[in-house]
Image (cartoon, helix red, strand yellow):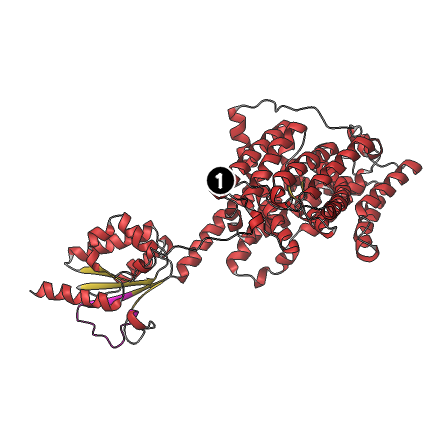
Amino acid sequence: MPAYSSMSKQNSPPVSLPPHSMPAGSESLARWFPVRPKIFSSLQGYTLSDFLRDLGAGVTVGIVALPLAMAFAIASGVPPQSGIYTAILAGFIISFFGGCSVQIGGPTAAFISVIALIVQKQGYEGLVICTILAGIILMIMGLAKMGSLIKFIPYPITSGFTSGIAVSIFLSQIKDFFGLQIGAVPAEFFDKVRTLGTALPLLNPTTTVMSVLALAFLWIWPRYVTRRVPASILLLAVATVVTIVFQLPVETIQTRFGGIPAGLPSFHWPQNVTFARIQELLPSAITIAILAGIESLLCAVVADGLTGSRHNSNTELFAQGLANLASPFMLGIPATGAIARTATNIENGARTPVAGIIHSLTLLIILLLGSQLAKHIPLSVLSAIVMLVAMNMGEWHELTRLRRMPGSDAIILLTTFLLTVIFDLTIAVMVGMVLAAFLFMKRISDTTQISLVTEENEQEGAHHSVIGKELPPGVLVYRIYGAFFFGAAEKMEEALENISSLPKVLILKMHTVPAMDATALNVLESVWEKMRRHDSHIVLSGPHTQPYFMMMQAGFVDKLGSENVCGNVDDALARAKEILGSSKS
């Protein structure tokens, strides 16, 4: 009996979830609609003590998020209020509809280079369309239960583009950090470096000193003073007061953007939406969607590790999509889970998504009451905040370990890094994924072995061994070890080419082949055709479930004859003797 028969009828036991994680009667709903916001299960048994913890955490992280939201928006080439609007609206949606109890959503540094490039080439209206498309893509991914697929993106790619984004962010802040009086910085890498290098000797001394002091303060305060008082908030307060009192000649939010409007904006409908423009912007939208998906799920994994909880990746993707779909209608920008703000939320005692909702309400109150003060914030200080974020987000330790990495991983990481810096994230991810796929296929192919089996080189035991068993003349046994995919299929042809004359019966031991693909099946069919023309036969020994059913569905089992598919070597040898006996008669 073939090896597949013992496996095909086994059913995996159902996964049991805690009673509070899935309401009664929702199992059938979850099969076709995987969106189950955490807030509903989190509020079961919710107490006043839980609310007070969430309140303290939400207010704290809301204050921390304010300078980051403005800084990321300005670095992306949009007004500071767009970052605040995003943190308020997208942050609320991600917390209310998300699959992680304590994740904080909003604008992040990872989007800066992508957004800046879109705004430079397509304007803000182009970014609006991209963000809406990205939101739709993320929602579809969540509904299609693709949350786990994001995790299959190789780490060298995520590490490479993360470090590349950090370099791009760092370069984008040089103009404001040194107060350079130049126009728009070119988007192309080499033109950008040339322009910044030429203008660097003309730096503004006051702006430069303020930036350096701000960067030093941000570095020293949490390490040697305290983490209880957010360094960025204290820095903004002191720098704003100093700028006003001493009338420092530095650029502020007011001098560049005319201040920050109080209150939320009116509804904004996307302009110039045509099918041709959607086609043009779709690659950038896919990049935003992938980046938002990766960062949000990585953030959720970090949150799980800190809290001991478990997030729902499909629900999280759906919530991220809904947030990005809604954000542009309120003059917002792309949003995702923010790891640093989520960690701050957890460290301050957050228990449920209520903390994230309070974080959004805190930002709304600040926008309504404090927008007049925010207009005096120096851009150099916001630039220093973004620069420190860029330095912290880069996977620099991975770049120093390139020589100790496997060669394929090092190539992928370095290629993705350089393409992100020199070109853009879209090209980097596409090329990185293709390169990773090819190198993965080669690695799988290298692990697959096809060899002649004799008593001298036999390594198997029990029913799959030929040791001590009679091997009739005219019978050869070959062993296929590993996944039998197209990268390794040619090894079968090479192995048979080394045979001086075809055997009467060729036994292929397949009990160590977990899976095969169409190319490998095509090679098997070619070998069978060749054997048949010479009045020879093939007998398969111990095929597993996936290879067997693939051969059966393709009709190869019918061609071969089901009697020539055996469960082990003993049965295969017995079948070979039957074939030899019938041919003699």
Which of 458 and 3 lies nearest the eye of the viewer?
Answer: 3
Which of 538 and 572 lies nearest the eye of the viewer?
Answer: 572
Which of 414 and 89 lies nearest the eye of the viewer?
Answer: 89
Can you give x and y, in whole percent of width and height, for residue 84 in the image? 73, 35
| 279 to the left or right of 63 | left
Q: From where the camera sits, is residue 423 visible? A: no
Say which quadrant the C terminus sits in.
bottom left
Residue 468 located within the stretch drawn in magenta: yes
Q: From where the camera sits, is residue 362 visible? A: yes
Q: Is the stretch drawn in magenta largely helix, strand or loop?
A: loop
Above or below, 75 against 308 in this view is above
Q: Where are the magenta residues, as a range? A: 464-478
Q: Amino acid at mark 1?
A: Leu
Above or below, 316 against 476 in this view is above
Can you give x and y, in whole percent of width and height, for residue 369 in the image? 82, 32
Mark 1 sits on what residue? Answer: 29
Q: Is label 1 in a helix, a strand or a loop?
A: helix
Say which quadrant the N terminus sits in.
bottom left
| 324 to the left or right of 27 | right
Q: Quadrant of residue 336?
A: top right
Can you give x and y, in whole percent of width and height, for residue 214 in the image? 82, 47
Which of 15 and 337 lies nearest the eye of the viewer?
Answer: 15
Q: Residue at x 33, y 71 (%)?
A: 460
| 384 to the left or right of 15 | right
Q: Residue at x 14, y 65 (%)?
A: 578
Q: Quadrant of residue 138?
A: top right
Above or below, 139 against 564 in this view is above
Q: Which residue ends up furthest to the right in the rendered image?
A: 245
Residue 94 located within the stretch drawn in magenta: no
Can you give x and y, in whole percent of width and height, for residue 207 in the image? 84, 41
Q: Residues within 10 Å of mark 1 (few under 14, many from 20)?
A: few
